[in-house]
Amino acid sequence: MYSLKVKRLQSAEAALEAEHSSFVRLSQLSCELVARLEKGNGAAANNVRRRLDTVTQRWDNLVARIEEHSRTLVQSGKADVRQFAGPAVPAGPSTIERNLKADRVVRPNETSLKVTSMEDHAAAPEEATTDTEPEETTNQVVLIVERFLRHVEKLTAEMEPLQAWTATFSVSKKPDQVRKMISICQEKLIEIKDQEAKVNRLQLELEHMHLSSDVTAAQLKLANDAFEKFAKGWARIVTKISEAMNVLTGHDETDEEQVVAKGIEQWIEGCDK
């Protein structure tokens, strides 16, 4: 019986992960649409918010329930924590929690619509659900803030190699070193570009947290402080690669080296598109 429950939870995790990119895209498009409608058509903007709120609350409810059931099974000894985590993380958060990363979306603040699952309705009468709504909302907000802080911590750890490179790398202007310098910077640009998408998702998560009326000022300050500290480190990395490429592309190279430098400039422009 318990093995069946584990399989169902794993299946639910996989289903959410498969749909996560679509969920984030929906949130992004909805926020952009709200921004455009806000000044000229407030009613339409609120309608978009309410629709996004409904979808986001359903998502929050599913994620919270999967994590709750997984934790219960593990704590009761009916399941192994490794069944809900990757093989490299023997005692960490669940797969769904780790893989949703920094683009977790927090519901907007235009409605307090309560969304429950079929299991909720079967387990308790409607009145009981209404009574527990404030407590459930508070618990969800705490989970959201804690998850965001874990995302910041995880991404900070991932950035450590780039931070170390930033502190030690210096550009050589010697003609026989130009190709080597360009190759190194090209490699780092790829790494930075990979991390940039995660940084953007982390920032999006923070922005959505600001849209939620359920998040307290103290919780927002905690999230803002964590992100600000992370952003300073990220800025150092971006500044370093930019300065390095400016030096290399401005160097007085031979004709062949100028062609290589031009190619790098075009490659950078392509990455930014």
Image (cartoon, rainbow, N blue to C red):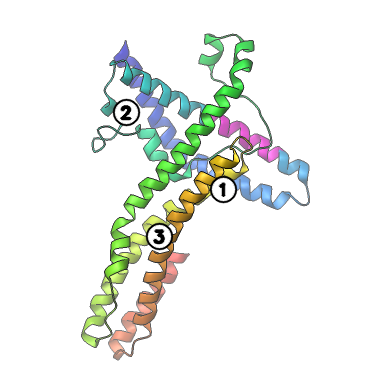
Which residue is found at the position 40% from the left and 41% from the top? Answer: 150
| In the image, residue 141 lies in the stretch drawn in magenta | no
Which residue is found at the position 77% from the left and 41% from the top? Answer: 43
Write down the residue under mark 3. 233
Nearer to the camera, 235 or 32 = 235
Q: Which residues are magenta?
A: 47-58
Q: Could you say whether the residue bearing mark 1 is in a helix, strand or loop?
A: helix
The majority secondary structure of the magenta stretch comes to: helix
Nearer to the camera, 92 or 228 = 228
First in sequence, mark 3 or 2: give its number. 2
Q: CA distance from mark 3 to mark 1?
A: 19 Å
Write down the residue under mark 2. 84
Write down the residue under mark 1. 207
Nearer to the camera, 256 or 122 = 122
In this rendering, the answer to whether 217 lies above or below 61 is: below
Closer to viewer: mark 3 or mark 1: 3
The reply to whether residue 169 is in sight is yes
The reply to whether residue 27 is in sight is no
